[in-house]
Amino acid sequence: MSSSRTDVDAIVVGAGFGGLNMLHELRKLDMTVTVFEAGGGVGGTWYWNRYPGARCDSESVYYMFSDRFSSQILDEWTWSERFAGHAEIRDYLDFVADKMDLRRDIRFNTRVSAAVYDEENNRWEVTTDDGATTTARYFVTAVGCISTTNLPPWPGLENFAGDWYHTGAWPHEPVDFTGKRVAVIGTGATAVQAIPEIAQQAAHLYVFQRTPNYDIPARNHPIGPDYVQKVKSTYPELWERARQSAFGLPYQVAEGSALDATPEERERVFQAAWDKGGFYIGLETYSDFLVNKESNDTISEFMRARIRELVHDPATAELLAPSDHPFFTKRPPLESNYYVTFNRDNVTLVDVRSTPIEEITESGVRTGGGSYGVDAIVFATGFDTMTGTLFRMGIKGRNGVSLEHKWADGPRTYLGLATHGFPNMFMITGPQSPSVLSNMPVAIEQNAEFIAGVIGHARSEGGDFVEATREAEDRWVAHHNELADGTLLLGTNSWWVGANIPGKVRTLYPYVGGVGGHRKICQDVSEAGYEGFTVGASSTAAS
Ligand code: NA7
């Protein structure tokens, strides 16, 4: 392996939380970095997801960079709501980018179309849609887990006379549905946020549901200075708890099975968490929902009972009450006025489980059960998550092997952050890392610090080449699969297991061992001299 010069030391793809954090960490190593970002600004998922009601389901005071990134920013930024809306999160990331002077290294409106490892020169050649090729020693993807939209290939969309939108690529100008008949297809976390908002404008809203979810009340509200001050004063402890926790949130971890409580005690515990709103009901009540079906049945039934209380029409309530999967084996949406929206006269729930969508027509949506005339269609049909964006980037490692080919039977990673055969490449929140099963900024912070740690280690050894070994990768995949097999998650059709995309490999994509567990393993790896990584040096530096 010889080595030639490169345009920059590292290329990072994406300028959301992950890319900004990675850029910051690489700068600390005195590296030159170019970040390519397809969007016109920072924000990642929040740049694209501007649909009505789009907001974060992690509490805003924990959905941010911690003191490890910048204690000044942590101190200066103040959120206005318990769960921040998309515009406020963009404002925050703009604030971060300006404060840290990050924009000078970011090339906006530039999409990566190919990234090829050149073994001869030990460098990555990254081609962008402006036709340019940029070379770098290191290549880091920070492309988000939920960034490539999924539009099911229903025939006829080209004939539709009205306007249509995908929630994940929403226009930057507000869309006015006033007086219009609107179809929303999908009832995932996105649709659950958008539907109550659109229903207030639309003349009539048809909601096309294939699978109901267990939607948890968000109980969003403005937060005042006293609360913010209290949180800020305890941040050091809260961040430490979040870093050691399973889900990247500083909640009190539940212990014990729901089956060990009396029915009355369970009801009281569930009700208190339901009233509190947010993910507490899944995380702070009992600990075995994901591994014990019988325990899960207790909370699933509690949730169904709440839905039946909220929705007046019994037939609609029954359609909205999930019975095909246990609670939290699919991402539970947080809802604000979602269920009660179905009590409005201008909202109709259409069951496309029993009568699937067959065609988009000139005038609307045709299912096996009938035709629905609409003026606008909102596709809230999700994403090709976790691997979709990585595969579309045209990544090729050693010997020209594509990532898609290497992962044809499912992702194979070391720690969810690197993959054998792709030297000097790292993934922020890659498959088989905690990623989407966590409060993302906390997972991202660890990922970025660890990746910088590996690169820093290689450099301190005089190296400029680092690769996960096949043995280390095999061990991680076996460990990942063993944990996944011990849960109920693989039994439910969800995007967590790739079930939303026809033909996609069914495997648990995120790592279920928790943010704290993953962090501990990574720490052990680093303390053992970055065990599982081969470090080397290019033989000569050509000019
Ligand atoms: P999701 O959670 O993947 O939801 C997509 C929705 O679209 C879901 O209700 C799907 O039903 C529905 N869908 C997808 N394809 C079809 C077809 N062919 N027919 C009928 N219905 C369909 O995406 P979101 O954008 O809501 O949320 C993604 C994540 O972003 C979320 O989990 C948070 O982590 C943030 P299905 O359930 O597959 O039957």
Image (spheres, grey):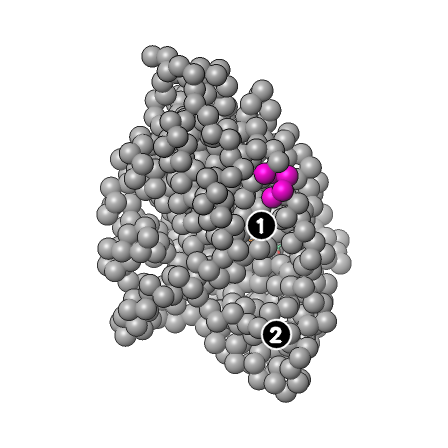
Q: Which of 405 and 213 is in front in this view?
A: 405
Residue 181 vs 433, above or below: the answer is: below
- The residue sitting at the bottom extreme is 264
| Left or right of residue 265: residue 488 | right
Q: What element carries label 2?
A: loop
Report crowding for label 1: few under 14, some 14 to 19, many 20 or more residues within 10 A (C-alpha).
many
| Residue at 48%, 36% in the rendered image | 426
Find the magenta span and give its range.
472-476
Which residue does the numbered mark 2 point to in the structure image? 256
Out of 363 and 122, give the one closest to the viewer: 122
Q: Which mark is residue 510?
A: 1
Specify the amino acid type for callout 2. Answer: Gly
Q: Which amino acid does label 1 sit on?
A: Pro
* Residue 100 x/y as whole percent: 25, 45
Taking the image as shown, residue 36 lies to the left or right of residue 488, namely left
Q: In which quarter of the image is residue 452?
A: top left
Closest to the camera, between mark 1 and mark 2, is 2
Q: Which residue is drawn at 48% across and 52% down?
A: 519
Q: Position of residue 148 (x, y in %)?
A: 53, 41
